[in-house]
Image: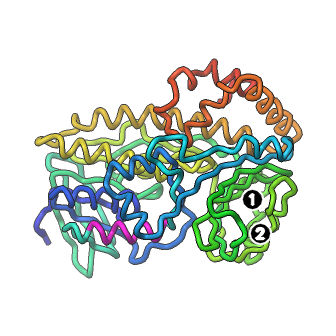
């Protein structure tokens, strides 16, 4: 059955699809959003927007929506390490709002909350949302077409543009013939939401390395903290089974982190999901009549938490391309493709450096980490690539991502 065709069909109504649907509908574009799930669930996606991503949210006009929904800013960042005296770590505390004008520091907001919020704002702006969508087929062309099952019927639409925003396991990229490149797994990563951590400073995020774990904490406000843990691939079963959350919290009984017991004694209130630590990317996320955004176009290694910021930049660039051109041909996305390719290359480099520094738990890995610390102490410019995770990859000079410069910091090649 054919139905009235909108200007844009967005496949996926998570954060990427919801944000794009909101900003396009607010600009008067006729938008249809198609979402496979009926409920947005906590699947341990990022709930932290880097300062550079906050700027993107402001430029999109969704920042105030996030604040109204309970968005929580963090002001301080500390890296703790068993190899570094605690006083030295705390003396190097980063003032997050000072890193970028207007960002007020990173912003935390629950992922299901954000998805539901953006769905609601898109609908209020005039977008249509169909949930529980079944079999879906996207065909490229001028115009493209989308066939999908919903409420017992099969529908076909021929919009001016299809946007694939259906995430890392979505179907659109495969259906339009995009090749996914992927790095090998470096280690494993897991996340969990906890409650009852009222004694943890609500403005403080930390990263710490001790023993056989790399842990991260991002307060959400009101005693809730999203915590993460990196650990060796050889410990693949470490968090499996009903005791997984307990084992996760036990890993937080660390000596190098003040008040770590506040986290260790908190209550798990989300799943404890483990996934591989690696990058995946699509060099050309555009086909005739179709463009990919967010994780559907490739994702960054989660160790540096760039997913939400990447997505907000994607949404802005695609929005600007559409609203700035009358003819929606693939050529209007050339700047998006070029910028995204370099952005993801730089972030991939930063993530790899971070994984080597913070998530190699052998004796050789600890020695390498110590040597990296010493080189950065001797030459503070060596910290510049790591700052890209907060300031954005385009805020750091290009030469800081050259292979020769990276090798000086890390003591050798990283690939």
- Residue 330 in the image: state x and y as whole percent: 22, 38
Question: Which label number is shown at residue 262?
Answer: 2
User: Earlier along the polypeptide chain: callout 1 or callout 2?
Assistant: 1
Q: Is residue 297 left or right of residue 30?
A: right
Is 118 magenta? The answer is yes
Q: Is residue 410 left or right of residue 30?
A: right
- The residue at the point 61 percent across, 45 percent down is 95
Closer to the eye: label 1 or 2: 2
Q: Position of residue 143 (x, y in %)?
A: 14, 50
- At label 2, counting other C-alpha atoms closer than 10 Å, the crowd grade (few under 14, some 14-19, many 20 or more) is some
Per the image, the residue denoted by label 1 is 236
Residue 250 lies, in percent from the top left, at: 82, 67
| Secondary element at image label 2 | helix
Q: Say above or below: 84 vs 236.
A: above
Local secondary structure at mark 1: loop
Q: Is residue 158 at all visible to an observer of this figure?
A: no
- CA separation, marks 1 and 2? 26 Å
Is mark 1 in CB contact (under 8 Å) with mark 2? no
The magenta segment: 111-122
240, above or below 352, in the image: below
Picture coordinates of residue 118, whole percent (x, y): 35, 66
Which quadrant holds the N terminus?
bottom left
């Amino acid at each position: 059955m054919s139905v009235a065709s909108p200007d844009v069909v967005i496949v996926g109504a998570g954060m990427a699809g919801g944000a794009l649907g909101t900003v396009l509908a607010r600009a008067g574009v006729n938008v249809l959003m198609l979402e496979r799930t009926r409920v947005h669930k906590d699947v341990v996606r990022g709930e932290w927007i880097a300062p550079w991503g906050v700027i993107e949210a402001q430029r999109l006009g969704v920042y105030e929506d996030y604040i109204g929904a309970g968005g929580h800013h963090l002001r301080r960042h500390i890296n703790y390490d068993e190899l570094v005296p605690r006083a030295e770590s705390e003396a190097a505390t980063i003032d997050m709002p000072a890193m970028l004008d207007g960002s007020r520091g990173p912003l935390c907001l629950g992922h299901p909350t954000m998805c539901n919020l953006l769905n609601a704002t898109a609908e209020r702006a005039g977008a249509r949302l169909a949930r529980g969508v079944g079999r879906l087929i996207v065909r490229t062309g001028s115009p493209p077409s989308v066939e999908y099952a919903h409420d017992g019927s099969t529908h076909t639409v021929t919009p001016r543009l299809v946007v694939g925003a259906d995430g890392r396991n979505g179907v659109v990229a495969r259906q339009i013939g995009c090749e996914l490149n992927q790095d090998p797994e470096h280690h494993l990563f897991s996340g969990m939401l906890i409650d009852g951590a009222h004694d943890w400073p609500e403005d403080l995020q930390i990263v710490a390395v001790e023993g056989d774990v790399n842990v991260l904490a991002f307060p959400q406000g009101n005693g809730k903290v999203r915590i993460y843990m990196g650990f060796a691939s050889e410990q693949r079963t470490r968090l499996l089974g009903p005791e997984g959350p307990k084992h996760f919290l036990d890993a937080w009984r660390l000596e190098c982190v003040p008040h770590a017991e506040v986290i260790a004694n908190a209550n798990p209130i989300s799943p404890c999901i483990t996934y591989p630590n690696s990058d995946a990317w699509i060099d050309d996320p555009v086909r005739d009549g179709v463009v990919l955004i967010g994780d559907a176009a490739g994702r960054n290694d989660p160790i540096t938490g760039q997913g939400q910021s990447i997505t907000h930049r994607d949404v802005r660039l695609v929005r600007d391309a559409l609203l700035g051109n009358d003819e929606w041909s693939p050529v209007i996305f050339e700047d998006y493709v070029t910028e995204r390719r370099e952005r993801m290359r730089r972030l991939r480099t930063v993530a790899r450096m971070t994984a080597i520094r913070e998530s190699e738990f052998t004796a050789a890995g600890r020695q390498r980490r110590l040597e990296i610390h010493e080189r950065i102490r001797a030459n503070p410019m060596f910290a510049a690539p790591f700052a890209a995770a907060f300031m954005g990859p385009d805020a750091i000079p290009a030469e800081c991502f050259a292979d020769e410069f990276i090798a000086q910091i890390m003591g050798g090649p990283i690939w």
